[in-house]
Amino acid sequence: MSSIKQKRLEGIIRRDISDIVAFELKDPDVGFVTITDVEVSNDHSYAKVYVSFLGKDARSQAGLRALNRAKGFIRSQLSQRLDIRRTPELTFLIDTTMEEGRHIDDIIAQIHESDSSEEG
């Protein structure tokens, strides 16, 4: 399978899961969640679904637990929307790219601060 088809499938799954979580999932523990990325295995049997939550870390953990509790429901809803032979097993993971990016920004800012203090 070409990577273009793979990326298209991942985009469709991301959009569909976002819709399912927003409009069909009734668990208040999920809260404000964004599906940031989806990685589907080459044989389409597994999908890693990366999510981020609005709020504190404890809120994220509660939301992640709620999504994992509901993954059977989400997968069954997804199977009705997708036109593929096998709907992948879903695994929900916290997307840490925002925190990693912030950390890199902090390091760069510290480097700039030490450069300017050495010049003066």
Image (cartoon, rainbow, N blue to C red):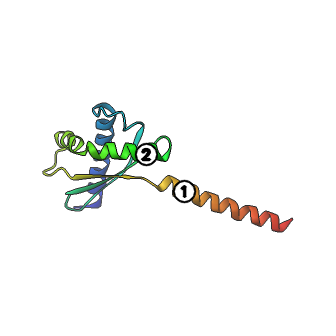
Q: Nearer the viewer, residue 14 or 8?
A: 14
Q: Residue at x 15, y 52 (%)?
A: 86
> Residue extending furthest left?
85
Q: Nearer the viewer, residue 36 or 70?
A: 70
The answer to whether any part of residue 52 appears in the image is no
The percent coordinates of residue 97 (x first, y second) are 48, 55
Q: Does 104 appear above or below 75?
A: below
Q: Residue at x 65, y 62 (%)?
A: 108
Q: Amino acid at mark 2?
A: Ser
- Element marked by disc 2: helix
Total labels drawn: 2
Q: Quadrant of residue 78?
A: top left
> Residue extending furthest bottom?
118
Q: Amino acid at mark 1?
A: Gly
Q: Which mark is residue 31?
A: none
Q: Residue at x 31, y 44 (%)?
A: 67
- Mark 1 = which residue? 101
Q: In the picture, which quadrant includes the N terminus?
A: bottom left
Q: Residue at x 37, y 38 (%)?
A: 30
> Residue extending furthest right?
120
Q: Nearer the viewer, residue 53 or 5?
A: 53
The percent coordinates of residue 93 (x first, y second) are 36, 53
The answer to whether any part of residue 11 appears in the image is yes
Q: Quadrant of residue 115?
A: bottom right
The percent coordinates of residue 117 (x first, y second) are 81, 64
- Element marked by disc 1: helix
Q: Residues within 10 Å of mark 2 (few under 14, many from 20)?
A: many
- Mark 2 = which residue? 60
Q: How far is the residue under mark 2 from the one under mark 1?
A: 18 Å
Which mark is nearer the camera, 2 or 1? 2
